[in-house]
Amino acid sequence: MMKHRKMIFCSALLALCAIPGRHEEAWAQLPSDVDKLHAKLFDQRTGQGSLLARVTREGDLRITIIPEVGLLSANPNPSPDLAYVQSITCGADAVVIGVQESSQSFLSENQEWIFTDNSVSVREILKDNAAHPLVPGSTIIIARSGGSIDTPDGHHIVVADPGYSPLHERGTYVLALRYVPSTGQYWQFDHRGGFRIDGKQALSLISQGKDTKEPRFDYDSETLSALVHRYVTECEKKP
């Protein structure tokens, strides 16, 4: 479910950075309009007007937002850490463990937001997409909020979304996803549905900054996988 966001900070950048897509072959296999179709997913988010118009007036931009505190499932488990996993599992079309290969950022269709398309190699499927089954070892594109772009006139824009910390190349992640029929790819629909695998831990991708009010939970990676499998079964039993 798309959550409303609250703007907390905008400032001029003093240094430039970029998010390159290094594995061009992964993108070459996709329809050329994937990014344009994914751009429609983020039009409910706003950077308070066209970012291209703002950067022309104000120079390089950095926009940081915090997520509103999300609701858990309608009938949450008495243990909030369990309700957290239950909510994202039942709401997802697929939950995968994957390795980040490359990424590329784009403006949303209304030019008020930036999102990033991530090329991810599927290592393990915790919840499969029943309508469009996934294949271990395949590569999927996952759209996520936030990113950075360079404009044609040489300016730089960053949208930093603490609910969606960037995926790092060769990093391993657990991601709860929804299918995008128009592209045949996926997007991370809920900021609670992302974890970085670090050894035996699955660490939430929600930032730990002082302004981030959303509760976050870290898990033992095997425990998280077992919980997802458990809730997949329970969700399927619900009418």
Image: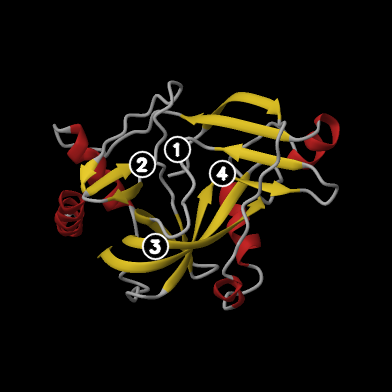
Q: Residues within 10 Å of mark 3 (few under 14, many from 20)?
A: many
Q: Name the residue under label 4.
A: 146
Label 1 sits on a secondary structure element that is loop
Position of the N terminus by quadrant: top left
Determine contact: label 2, label 3, CB under 8 Å.
Answer: no
Q: Name the residue under label 1.
A: 163
Q: How crowded is mark 1: few (under 14 residues within 10 Å), some or many (20 or more)?
A: many
Q: How many labels does the image show?
A: 4
Q: Which of marks 3 and 4 is nearer the N terminus?
A: 3
Alpha-carbon distance for marks 4 and 2?
15 Å
Label 2 sits on a secondary structure element that is loop
Q: Name the residue under label 2.
A: 192
Rendered image: mark on residue 171 = none
Alpha-carbon distance for marks 2 and 1?
7 Å
Alpha-carbon distance for marks 3 and 4?
19 Å
Determine contact: label 2, label 1, CB under 8 Å.
Answer: yes
Q: Earlier in the sequence, mark 2 or mark 3?
A: 3
Alpha-carbon distance for marks 2 and 3?
19 Å
Q: Mark 3 points at which residue?
A: 99
Name the residue rendered at 20%, 36% in the picture: 81
In the rendered structure, which amino acid carries the disc numbered 3? Val
Name the residue rendered at 41%, 45% in the picture: 190
Q: Is residue 96 visible?
A: yes
- Estimate the x, y position of residue 14 in percent, counting from the top left: 72, 31
Determine contact: label 1, label 3, CB under 8 Å.
Answer: no
